[in-house]
Amino acid sequence: MSGISNQSRSGEQTAAGDSKSSNRRRILRWGLLLSAWLIGFGGAIQQAAAADEWKLIPYRGLKYVSAANVKDFYRFTALEENGKKLTFKSPNLVMEWELNSQSIFINKVKFVLSFPVIKPTYRTIVSVVDLAKLIDPVLRPGYIKQVGKFDTVVIDAGHGAHDPGAIGLLGYEKNYCLDTALRLEKALKKRGFKTHMTRRTDKFLELHERVKVANSIKNSIFISVHYNSSDNHLATGIETYALAPQGTESTNSGRASGTRRRGNSRDGENIALATAVHAMAMHRMKVEDRGIKRARFNVLTGITRPAILFEGGFVTNSADAKRIHTAEYRQQLANTVADAIVGFRKAVGGK
Ligand SMILES: [Zn+2]
């Protein structure tokens, strides 16, 4: 649970072994480096007092915390309730919830919670799982425990050879993935990272082989590059997946799993990496925000490194397909992901 239980803020700081000022610096850097989306996160969080505690509310077998508790803990200056909408405000940070909905927005970027925000009695509450596995690591990436330094990015181009992935209006997903991945490789090298490709030709790899590669590379993070498809040809936009936390449903299947996966050891980093990449994409690209979602894709469950799966648009939507078919768009995506990784590294305390 990333230290969110009954601990006070000061207790967490001590546990993390960090001085207050270095945490502040980290949070501020995250804010400054993650584009306009996150500017001001530090501002909201720096004013923390030591006495804040989480007051856990049991409800139907789960633990929750109240919206008021969230407001106080993160030192939002206002919490406005308007019908089903709740808005947490600070000078540069706005978080929006909606009753009975799993979608929340943090500075307009969409995240999908594992459990809906509810109001069973007089208080609006959010699950502790979502607090610990999403809200806290996104608002305070500098507090994520067990962050390893990384200097290498394992880039996984989805599909390959006899597995074309989605059959798009203008081409196969596998080819777009590979081209984008190769562009990302160059963009990351330019920014000083080492890279490792799971494939660099039109070759097929089983998902477990991709996982094996990822886990064999030291000091690395993992990005799987895909493009999306849907029977609904109107479906458009970008979505980013992080492994679903233990005991929660994945966004699309609606199936929960109580089994802890190897990848769950990186829950905090996974959601922070997804946030960095997705927020940068929303900031740079004029596309629909489909949100940061949860899944138990085989390629994510077994990875012991921070890992995400990025879906760069729909090859089955005519506007998206046209964009994806251009080198300019794929290059822009590659640059965006590369810049986001630079921001992520700084946010979690790297150089
Ligand atoms: Zn795919």
Image (tube, helix red, strand yellow):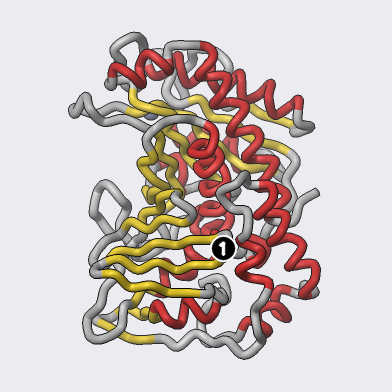
Residue 79 versus residue 334 in the image, above or below: below
Quarter of the view holding residue 277 = top right
Residue ID for mark 1: 139
In the image, 88 versus 273, the foreground residue is: 88
Residue 265 shows in this picture: no
Quarter of the view holding residue 235 = top left
Residue 176 versus residue 258 in the image, above or below: above
The residue under the point 45% across, 49% down is: 109
Q: Is residue 170 left or right of residue 137?
A: left
Which residue is outermost to the left? 231
The residue under the point 68% across, 84% down is: 10
Tell me where residue 17 appears, x and y as whole percent: 76, 75
Q: Is residue 243 left or right of residue 146?
A: left
SS for dot 1:
helix
Q: Residues within 10 Å of mark 1 (few under 14, many from 20)?
A: many
Tell me where residue 7 appears, x and y as whole percent: 58, 85
Tell me where residue 64 appears, x and y as whole percent: 37, 79
The residue under the point 54% across, 45% down is: 307
Tell me where residue 329 appears, x and y as whole percent: 50, 19
Q: Is residue 328 left or right of residue 344?
A: left
Residue 329 versus residue 13 in the image, above or below: above
The amino acid pointed to by label 1 is: Leu
Residue 129 shows in this picture: yes
